[in-house]
Amino acid sequence: MKIQSSAEACPGAALNRAFFETGAAELAPRLLGKLLCHRTPEGLAAGMIVEAEAYCGPADDAAHSFGGRRTARTEAMFGPAGRAYVFRIYGMHCCFNVVAAREGEPQAVLIRALEPAAGLALMAARRGTEEPLQLCSGPGKLCRALDIGMAQYGLALCGSELFLADFRDFSPAEICVSPRVNVDYAEAWRDTPLRFFLKDSPYVSRVPRRYGALGTLG
DNA sequence: TGTCCGATTGGT
DNA sequence: CCAATCGGACAG
């Protein structure tokens, strides 16, 4: 019988599509504590979501789908909820989003940071560092650590390759809110608090100057 | 076809 | 603070 290391989380059943069929702003905080898992020929790599940002569709001027822009790049966001919207940025990094809402409603949640939970050696090899805090503390980093790229574009997240699973639950008091990172190009929605992260988690990509607890004033 | 630039990261 | 590095978006 194979020994399972106590440090390695064993993911449960994949969350089904219904879980994702809600607005991005509501889905983002609900994703905190979930396990993001990717099975590849090399093995399983998984991490607990500790930071996520909501991109709310045509009205959100920070979103790729602002104004209803529908191109080959944004197409996945227009599809049904629970699929992967992956995009390349700066010619060298990929960012992973979970499609939210409903078909025809281009909303998504950007996964910004994970707390490594399984396959740490695999992540370390892919990232070129052994430091746990550096493995998945950023949208580009976690894609590299889990080997998520354009090959996963549009992939349904309810299968056995790339999926989310229940892991831990957090109360609203343990969840913080702040404006989104690097969206200064936006105007109306630039300061809207749509970034959600676990309070005091050292795995968050970076701590904002000002933030508040979920459901309270900053 | 040409130009501009980014939902980032890592090193000065 | 700044460079890396390139496909998407858009103007012409």
Image: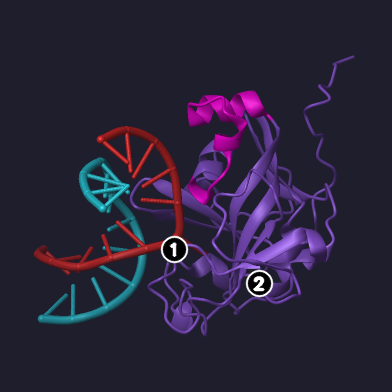
Chain colours: A purple, B red, C cyan
Q: Residue A188 in magenta?
A: no
In this view of the protein, which residue sits in the foreground, A123 or B11?
B11
- Specify which label sits upstream in the sequence, 2 or 1: 2
The residue depicted at 71 percent of the width and 55 percent of the height is A199
Number of disc labels: 2
Look at the picture and state if A174 lies above or below A6: below
Could you tell whether A85 is left or right of C8 in the image?
A: right
Secondary structure at badge 2 equals helix
Quadrant holding the C terminus of chain A: bottom right
Quarter of the image where one finds residue A131? top right
What residue is pinned by disc 1? A182
Q: Residue A139 in magenta?
A: yes
Look at the picture and state if A213 lies above or below A66: above
The residue depicted at 81 percent of the width and 21 percent of the height is A5
- Residue type indicated by callout 1: Asn
Secondary structure at badge 1 equals loop
What residue is pinned by disc 2? A24
Could you tell whether A134 is left or right of A116 in the image?
A: left
Q: Magenta stretch?
A: A119-140
